[in-house]
Amino acid sequence: MSVSGDMPLIVTIDGPAGAGKSTVARRVAGALGVDFLDTGAMYRGVAAAVIDAGIDAEDSDAVGALAEGMHIGFNWGTDPPRLKVDGVDVSHRLRDADVTANVSLVAGNSRVRRVLVKAQRWIGKEHPRLVTEGRDQGSVVFENATIKFYLDASPEVRARRRADQLRAAGRTNVDEEKILHRIVHRDERDSTRTDGPLMCPEDAERIDSSDMSLDEVVELMTKRARAEIGVGVDE
């Protein structure tokens, strides 16, 4: 059952790389009948723009200037919403290897974060019934969210899941050990950066999905969200 059409609801799902936040958030949003915001796609969109413009991701000034001059948003008429940068759909670029390799560095840029945090808050005002996922949604962007989750899993489980996703997508020669190394490295970088570090908000419910199925995680979050706003799970 969807929540009431006039009932405000912001659900944040934070967590590390490979925890399945996007997939879970999209399904929870669908179950609740609200919009889905993939903030990771926004950072990947900036990373893709940086690469395609020939800018070194380590050139913080150039990366920041590019982000401040771009318009980034979503086509809300699609499911899931497709990302557009300066009016161009860049969704096809978001999972490319070069984007994945550079997104953490780009996301650590203070100017990039200021631009996207502002954009995400604007989206929250325009779409007040929203499930949003990222690394700082409950801790920074939507501090007063209706309900907050922190979705986690062991690095080994996250690496295995990511490898399975790549194989299912037709990728060959998937090196799970390299994926694990990247995940551990990104966890370290994301949790130690100055702006919007990866963290579990004090008022968030932490869910370790290492031994849970996707359906179990979605069902748990959906029930918690409905209980929080007083909507019976069996109505």
Image (tube, rainbow, N blue to C red):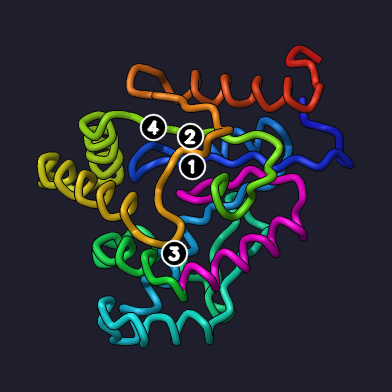
Write down the residue under mark 2. 150
Q: Nearer the viewer, residue 195 or 214?
A: 195
Q: Are marks 4 and 3 in contact (CB under 8 Å)?
A: no
Badge 1 density bin: few <14, some 14–19, many ≥20, Cα 10 Å: many
Question: How far is disc 4 from disc 3 in space, using C-alphas?
Answer: 20 Å
**Residue with the mark numbered 3:** 43
Q: Residue at x 67, y 30 (%)?
A: 31
Percent coordinates x, y for residue 130 in the rendering: 69, 46
Label whose residue precedes the other's in the sequence (2 or 3) = 3
Label 2 amino acid? Tyr
In-image side of 152 versus 144 (left or right): left
Residue type at mark 1 is Asp
Number of residues whose C-alpha sits closer than 10 Å to that of mark 2, classed few (under 14), some (14–19) or many (20 or more): many
Mark positioned earlier in the residue sequence (1 or 3)? 1
User: Is 113 covered by the magenta stretch?
Assistant: yes
Q: What residue appears at the point 36 percent right and 79 percent down from the top-left corner?
A: 50
Distance between the alpha carbons at the discs numbered 2 and 1: 5 Å
Q: CA distance from mark 1 to mark 3?
A: 15 Å
What's the distance in space between the residues labelled 1 and 4, CA to CA?
Answer: 9 Å
Instruction: Say whether marks 2 and 4 touch (CB < 8 Å).
Output: yes
Residue kind at label 3, given as amino acid type = Tyr
Instruction: Label the magenta part by its dominant secondary structure.
Output: helix
Dot 4 corresponds to which residue? 152
Cβ atoms at labels 2 and 3 below 8 Å apart: no
Q: Which stretch did the figure color magenta? A: 112-136
Disc 2/disc 3 C-alpha distance (Å): 19 Å
Dot 1 corresponds to which residue? 14
Residue 111, compared with residue 66, is above or below; it is above
Q: Are marks 2 and 1 in contact (CB under 8 Å)?
A: yes
